[in-house]
Image (cartoon, helix red, strand yellow):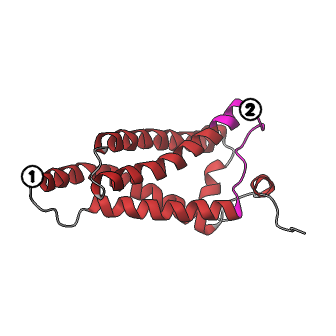
Amino acid sequence: MNDRPSLESVLKTTTGYSGIQIALHWLIALLIAVAWFTGEGAGEAMESIEEGGVAGFVPHVAIGLAILALVVVRVLVRLGRGAPAAPGVPGSLAVIAADWGHRLIYLLMIAVPLGGISTWFLGLDVGELHGLAANVLMIVTLGHAAMALYHQYIVKDGLLRRMMRPA
């Protein structure tokens, strides 16, 4: 007999995020922003290597690896603990959009660092695709942040508090 609840039931019954989920959310968000702003330096370092030079420590690469590791932890925690449902009527366009928006963010948080690894460590010529995906990740996450602020200050449903206080 399996007494463990299904992922679906956990996702439906969880009312808030845990402290680790909140910490991972904000840490990864900060690292994504820093990685985006340091991307040009990694490109310059890669050009130096291609021209026979050396590139010392490249913060962008280290940050990208940290993002990937933390996202893996975040996915495992989410699978184990679940997450609260999006506010609104289940099945409504807003709830479906929130669900797919989160899926896209998770996909990009994994794909962008893998693209960087493919370029930096494997020598594959996917640097431009990596950069494009990073820009898409920034746009989607900025949209995510804008929607959270919209819910908090326009709709006034307290949505942002869920990512500020553990439940």
Q: Residue at x 23, y 48 (%)?
A: 40
Visible residue check, residue 167: no
Q: Residue at x 46, y 55 (%)?
A: 29
- Within-10-Å neighbours for mark 2: few <14, some 14–19, many 20+: few
Give how far across and how far down residue 132 sits, in percent.
35, 38
Q: Which residues are magenta?
A: 81-97
Distance of mark 2 from mark 1, alpha carbons? 54 Å
Q: Name the outermost residue toward the left.
A: 52
Q: Residue at x 14, y 56 (%)?
A: 49
Q: Is residue 85 magenta?
A: yes
- Give the total number of marks visible in the rendering: 2
On the picture, is 8 further left or further right than 62? right
Visible residue check, residue 29: yes
Give how far across and how far down residue 161 sits, in percent.
63, 55
Q: 54 or 15: nearer the eye?
A: 54
On the picture, is 71 further left or further right than 57? right
Give the number of the disc on residue 51. Answer: 1
Give the number of the disc on residue 92. Answer: 2
In the picture, the quarter occupied by the C terminus is: bottom right
| Pair 2/1: label in front | 1
Picture layout, residue 92 above or below residue 102: above
Q: Is residue 70 magenta?
A: no
Task: Name the kind of residue labelled 2 in the image.
Answer: Ser
The image quadrant of residue 58 is bottom left
Q: Residue at x 46, y 59 (%)?
A: 28
Question: Is most of the magenta stretch helix, strand or loop?
Answer: loop
Q: Secondary structure at mark 2?
A: loop
Q: 101 or 160: nearer the eye?
A: 101
Task: Name the kind of residue labelled 1 in the image.
Answer: Glu
Give how far across and how far down residue 149 sits, in percent.
55, 43
On the picture, is 5 further left or further right than 99? right
Q: Secondary structure at mark 1?
A: loop
